[in-house]
Image (cartoon, rainbow, N blue to C red):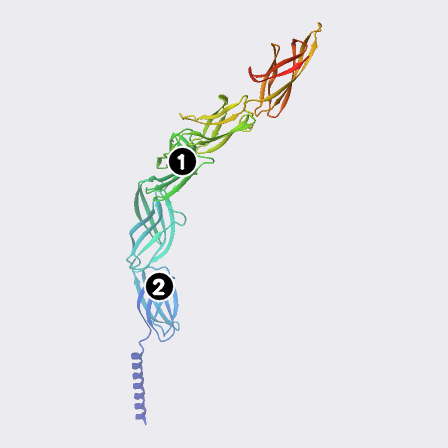
Amino acid sequence: MVRFRAVLLVTLIGAMVLTAGCSGVLDSGPSVSNTQTQLTEYGPAIEFNYSVSDYSQVLLQRPDGEVVTDDTIEPNQSSSALLMGDPQPGTYKLIVQQGGETVVTKEVTFDGPNAHVREVNANWSGSVLHDVSVTIENTGDLPFYVKSGTVSVRDASVNGSLYEWIPANTTETVTVSPSFGALVVEESGDVRGQVSIRAANETFTDTFAKSFEGPNLKVVNTSSQWNGDTLTHVTATVKNTGDMGTTATAAVYHGEEQRAIDGFGTRIAAGETVQYDISSFSYIYRATSGGDVDLSLVVNSSAGFTTTPLSHSVTGADVTITSLTPNWQNGVLQNLKFTATNEGDVESEFTAYITVGGEEIASPTYRIGGGETATFSYGDGLSSGYGPIYTVTSGGDVDVTVSVSTPGSTGTSEKTASASFEDVSASINADATFYEQMNGNDYELSSLDVDIQNTGGLPVSYDSIEIEVDGATRSESLYSTQSIASGSSATEYLSFTDAIVVSDGSHDVTIRLKNGGETVLSDTVTVST
């Protein structure tokens, strides 16, 4: 009985030993391997492979002994990662715990990041510095954190936030961009800029350089809008062929006089082309005579003046009369109209010389624009002079001529219109008053009432009346020239202080109507005492 138990004990012990040996072969226990750093969207982490048979707690301990992260790892997974926080050189520990007991500890040692600047590239647009690209190489075994950067050019500097990680054994390029605006170099010459990259515990500094010759403005094209003798608008295309921007104005000059300017200045970046539109409230320039116009376009900037001639030739005024229309009414020239054309570009003031029947009647002055055709009148009481202009006193042809001479022109232009008139025609009757003299044989002609009826087509105009009776003549001047229109009549009452003495009976009286000493019309009537 005792042997059996021993055998049985031995057997049981042997079975236990065998079972334990088998367990060691089938399950080697928790393990951690293949550690490496990795950048995640949340920051640097240690990535590792693991093997556990049950849910376990894994801790990451920094070199200073502080546990920065922990996590639960599952038996059905084989890899995980823990955030490192702010990476430090030294030995990190990955600690696997089950039920509060440490089952695996994995040590990982880092020398730390080792960063330096390899290359600096400045992004210029003309004289405007938009940003600076800095290539940083990290040859260390931990990621390198870049916080911000500063770019300085001459006396100006701008800051830019970066907040970027550069992985271990990697080369990355970061760009320092101003938070607001850009750096602008205002003066030509050599520029030495500096860029500073700030990390957690150190700052890297490097330089860049550029040389600027300055702005160079060129007038590419000009266009001038002329209306006859008047410049109303100028368009100028200006290109900056230099390597710096500048602010420029464009103005039109006549000699030393500024006639118009475009605004208060336009910014022209390097390589940029802008268009200036120059005008004035009414007009830019108006020529007063024919010939070449001395105008120029002046572009003014910090680079100096750029002057471009605005060539234009103006044709002098040349007025010609194209038509003439006299307005005759029963031998009276009431008014006239004439049409004139200015074949030049310049506005002209001209004198029209009006001649009727060989007599210069008037010389009014008119104005006509360049290239214009206009109709002018004289004698209408509105534009020039009051009618009637002329009265025909005898039959025949009457010429009306208008001639003009343009100032600055050697030639003249004239137009003539002719009209034909019949002779003056009228019937004259008279009623005489006689007084008997003391002798009883003779009579004195005291007064004579002369009735004049205009029976012709011309007005009868006269300023005095002469009578002749039996060889004796008397003349009476009127207060003013009288004119009897066609178909009208008038009565003139003549009295004589120096009476004409005639005998009793019938007598022939010759009545002469005169104007300016010339006889206009005469007729003979018979009167009785």
Badge count: 2
Between marks 2 and 1, how big is the CA–CA gap?
66 Å
Q: Residue at x 30, y 79 (%)?
A: 24
Which of disc 1 and disc 2 is earlier in sequence? 2
The image position of residue 128, as x and y in percent, is 36, 45
* 212, 267: nearer the viewer: 267
User: Would you identify the image quadrant in which residue 223 lies?
Assistant: top left
**Is residue 8 visible to us here?**
yes
Q: Amino acid at mark 1?
A: Ala
Q: Residue furthest top?
A: 439
The residue identified by callout 2 is 45
Q: Quadrant of the N terminus?
A: bottom left
User: Would you identify the image quadrant in which residue 345 lies?
Assistant: top left
Between circles 2 and 1, the one closer to the viewer is: 1
Count residues near mark 2 (Cα–Cα under 10 Å), then give few for <14, some for 14-19, many for 20+.
many
The residue identified by callout 1 is 251
The image position of residue 405, as x and y in percent, is 44, 25
Badge 1 element: strand
Badge 2 element: strand
